[in-house]
Structures are given as C-alpha cells and as structure tokens.
Amino acid sequence: MALALETIRERVGQRKQWYHTLELAPGVITPGWFDLRTVAPQVLPVSLAGKRCLDVGTFDGFWAFEMEKRGASEVVAVDIVDPRAWDWPITAGDELVQILEDRKQGGAGFPIAAEAFDSKVTYKECSVYDLDEAEVGRFDFVFMGSLLLHLRDPIRALECLRGVCASDGIVCTMDAIDPTMSVLFPRRAMATFDGDGRPWWWMPNIAAYARMVKAAGLEPIGRPTPVRLPRGGGHPIVKPSRKVLMNREGRRLLAATRKGDPQAWIHSRPVAI
C-alpha cells in the first residue's frame, strides 16, 4: 500500500542527503544531488514492457523506478551499502570515508522511495564485480550509471554486466567523460587518472569510453552520446572566486554547477564468443 502524503513528506525531511531527485508524490520532491528527470527519456527506451531489467549502483533507485514505470516485468536493483567496501585507494583517509558514509546513510533513501511508489523493485546488496548469472539470472536490459568512474577495474565491471545480459539484450551505461580530451582527441582513446585518496579513478574521453565497452565484449550501438547531468537542489553550489578559478578541479566544479556534470551514455549488445 502506498504511503500517505504527509508520511512521505515527513520521511523525506528526516533524511539528511539524497543523491537522486525523486518526485515521490505530487509536490514532494527529494533534494537530490542530481536531477535526472530530463535525462532519463534520452537514455532509456520509451517502453520496457515485458523486459527483465537490472539497475547496478542504484543508490536512491531513480533508474530502477524509471524502468519499472516503463513497464518492466521485473526490476532488480543492486548496490553496496557500506562505502568501506568501495574501490578506495590505499591512501584514502577515514574522514572522507565517513563523509561518503554519511551521504549514503546505509542506502536509506531506496526503501523510502520504494514504499512511496508502492514499488515491486527487488533490492539486493551486491557489488558489480560479484554479479553472477547463477545468483541473479539474465536480464533483457542492464543499466549502470555513474559508477565506472569510481571503479578500479572498469573493464572487469563491464564484463560482469555482459555476463548477466541476455544474448539478445541491451547493456546501457552512462558515465563521466573528460569533455576537453573528447574535443582535443576525438578519435584517440585517452583517459585521465585520479586515484588520489578517493574512489575516483578513470575518466575517459568519448573515444576511450567506446573502446572500454568493446574491450569488455560488448558491441556499441552507435557512438556514445554526450549528456549533462543537471545538479539537484541538494548539491553544494560552487561560486566563482580566485581560489576556484586558479584550480583546475575548481574550474571543473564551477562548470558542472552551471552546466551539469559531463557524461555520455551508450547502448551495446553482448558479442557472441
């Protein structure tokens, strides 16, 4: 049974941070870090009727619920609740781990949203690396968004998606790209590397993103499509200042605040081997 409007409003207010902007009821919108409501129609098929779907790295569940709204016969959403199990560099400090743990809050946003939507999405605590056909079966449509950036081994993760996708199914990924290198090197596969104390690893240009998908045994359906992820009401606002403008990361964050985070999405199919 769906929750009463006042109960939904109360539960939204009790949570300190939301990652996804979700309209859980008329006029009740979560203050997410990102508002993907205008992005979903670009990335997901209009209809997923009769399809078995998987959302990897679900967080508050935006993509899982969007797939359910599009008529999926079954949606499974997986994520790692404990940030300590993420791909952290060995140099990571406890302070940053705690900050991200406070943001994740044990995955508390998902059950609130699921109950508000009266959703039948199945939630499983599972790493993308541990996806196993024997455990979860195969899916007609597999989605993973904004996760490759945070993985030490993105190719292995893509291979795991391929391993649970039906032979005639579609894998859809959407992830961070380096827009400058995409312009400067439109055909050469290149990536910038972070790995400095936080779970931010590889940021490819568009050519490298397509190459990563191919390397995992997936055949892209067209080229990756650039998209900007709009900031939601809960995202910290970066304002111009001398310190921000003199720092490359500051300039990146300022541009993202104004335009949205640069990402690209691509649909692909498993290659028969």
Image (cartoon, rainbow, N blue to C red):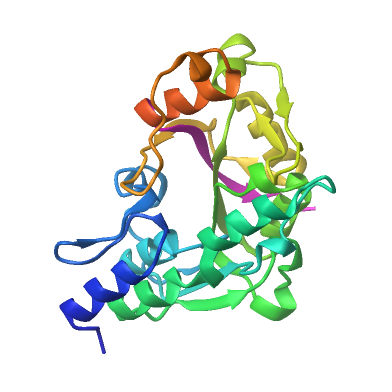
From this view, report whether residue 235 is shown above or below residue 32. above
Q: Position of residue 247 (x, y in %)?
A: 58, 17
Residue at 59% from the left image edge and 56% from the top image edge: 100
Query: Which one is nearer the viewer's eye here, 159 or 31?
Result: 31
Q: Is residue 58 magenta?
A: no
Considering every residue shown, the one lying at the far bottom of the view is 1
Q: Where is residue 42, by image quadrant?
A: top left
Query: Which one is nearer the viewer's eye here, 271 or 126?
Result: 126
For residue 165, side relative to residue 250 (left or right)? right
Residue at 26% from the left image edge and 90% from the top image edge: 1
Query: Which one is nearer the viewer's eye here, 130 or 13?
Result: 13
For residue 12, side relative to residue 142 (left or right)? left
From this view, report whether residue 149 is shown above or below residue 259. below
Residue at 57% from the left image edge and 60% from the top image edge: 57
Q: Is residue 267 magenta?
A: yes
Q: Where is residue 121, by image quadrant?
A: bottom left
* Residues in magenta, as a range: 259-273
For residue 177, side relative to residue 29 (left or right)? right
